[in-house]
Every structure is written in structure tokens, then in C-alpha cells.
Amino acid sequence: MRIFYSDHHTLPLSSGHRFPADKYRILREKLIADVIVDEQFLSMSTAATDEQLLRIHTREYFESIVNGTIDPKAMRRIGFPWSTELVIRSRHSTGATIAAAQTALRENLGINLAGGTHHSFADCGEGYCVFNDVACAARELQVNYKIGQILVIDCDVHQGNGTASIFQQDSSVFTFSIHGAKNFPHHKEKSDLDIALDDGTEDDQYLAELDRGLEECFERCKPEFIFYLAGADPFYRDRFGKMKLTKAGLMKRDELVLSLCSRKNLPVAISMAGGYAPDLNDIAEIQSNTVRLALQYRPEAKSL
């Protein structure tokens, strides 16, 4: 089974920038060092094509990013300085989620060691998100693999507002976001199911609400495929998270989601989404646990 990464495409950020871009490389190196994944199964991502990106994003926004003509105010909303490297990295991160989804169709599991760029709308980006990788991958599955309804389980601490907006009038993709009520983004979009939690939420309450939300998802939709955004930012030491989940609680969260996918024998593609702990090793540990549990709960591959 292939696991995809794009950290070989670096972002040219200033030393004081708040985005911890090195976390992706550290995660990949930890997976190898801890013998969670054999290096031979790690694959460099390929870039998302124009066609794949334009299924979701407006041509005006897409061309403004690719050509570097985006308005400076719109670029500040994204939070990165524009550069050719940013365009390349964003294409490859999206391509990694598309490849992970294609892998999951064959193997029941696909993993992108980055991605989860759920604040990207059809016509703009924000919150460190340029292109919406999960939305692009969902459309790829529907257009080229005839997948029916898709469920997005978004456990990043911030609401998946871009994904919710993109699919708001589209019943073929059911969006579920469990997030901080008072956290970014300040204006929330309407997902198919939103569970908004108070600052300081701890393990037990979070897990109970997540369990309730997952049950409601499967009462209201019949997915053929699942995208799981396994954000590390509900962690109590996260700079932006405002929640109080422990590493053990986050592992139980992953077990809850992944064991459910396994019992229902549904293919799942995982994106790592957010993580902003000051010690990047904390992020790598949380997300390497996600990968380890995903491999543990992966059901037998389907015969295609």
C-alpha cells in the first residue's frame, strides 16, 4: 500500500512565520524511524492537474494563483506569501490526496501525510489553504470511478468551512465537522452536520460527541467512500486549538473513526490536516499514531 508525501516541495517562509511547515518532513521521518511504515511504501506525490482543480475551483481564482496575479488582500487571507514554490506545493499536496483516494479504492486505505486544506473555497483560499484537496479528490472519484455518495469526517479543530460551502447544495457529498465553536473561522458555513464544542473540551466529552455525530452521519447518508481529516490540533498543547484533548484521547478518536470504517468495510482516505503544537515532535507523534492505527484497522483489500 502506498502512502503519499509532498514535503520534498518546500514552502519559502520567513523564520518567524507561524505555519510549521517542517512538521510534514518530521512525520515522514518518524514513520520510518519507528518502523511504522517501510520506506519503500512511501511515494512522492504527483501534481493535481488543471482539470482536477477546475472541477472545484473557479477559473478566475485558479488562474490568479497559478499566474501570481492574485490580489494581495486575498493572498493575506490565505496566510502565505505567493511564490512559484507555493503553487507547486499546493498542487502536489492536492495530488497526494487524490492518489490516496485512488489507492483506497484498491486497498481500502490511502494516506496523505499532508492535506486537509478544508478552508479553501471554490473562489478563494484562507487559513493556510490554497486548493481544497478533499473536494478535488471527491470529484475525481465521482467523475472517473463512478463512486456514489461520499462522507467527509472532519476532525480538525477548525470548521471545514470551505468544504461545507463547496458541497452545500450537493447531496452526493455529506460533510460532517466537529470543531471549536469559538475558534477560527469566525464565520461558520453550514455543513450537513456540525458539532461545535466549547473551548477547553476534554477527551470524554469530545469522544461522546464524536460517537453521536458518527451515528447520525450513517443514519442520514449511505456513503460508498470516506475522507477522514485527522487534525492534530485538538491537542491541549496546540497553539491555536483551544481544546484539551490528550494524545491518548486523540488515539481513541482515531480508533473510533477507523474501526467504524473497518466494520462497515468502507474505503477511507486520510489527510493529516492541522497541527500547531510548539514542539513539532508532538504533532509527529499524534499523526504517526493515526497512521499506525489506520494500518491496524485496514480491512482486507477489495478484489477489483
Image (tube, rainbow, N blue to C red):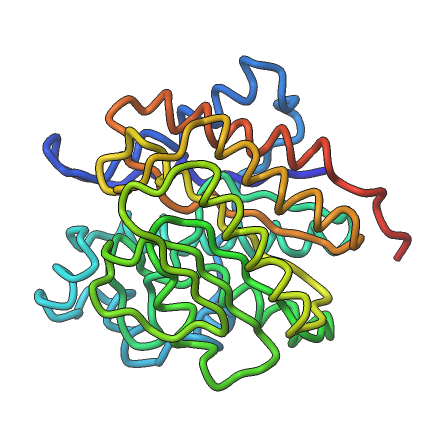
Q: Residue at x 12, y 59 (%)?
A: 76
How many marks the image carries: the answer is 0
Q: Could you tell me if residue 24 is visible in this image? A: yes
Q: Position of residue 52 (x, y in %)?
A: 51, 69
Q: Residue at x 51, y 68 (%)?
A: 175
Which of 285 and 220 lies nearest the eye of the viewer?
Answer: 220
Q: Is residue 125 left or right of residue 39?
A: left
Q: Position of residue 236 (x, y in %)?
A: 32, 32
Which of 104 and 41 lies nearest the eye of the viewer?
Answer: 104
Q: Is residue 24 left or right of residue 70?
A: right
Q: Residue at x 15, y 68 (%)?
A: 74
Q: Is residue 213 left or right of residue 277?
A: right
What quarter of the picture does the N terminus occupy?
top right
What quarter of the picture does the C terminus occupy?
bottom right
User: Which of the 4 image quarters holds residue 56?
Assistant: bottom left
Which of 168 and 236 lies nearest the eye of the viewer?
Answer: 236
Q: In the orientation shown, which residue stands out farthest toward the bottom? A: 169
Q: Position of residue 247 (x, y in %)?
A: 45, 27
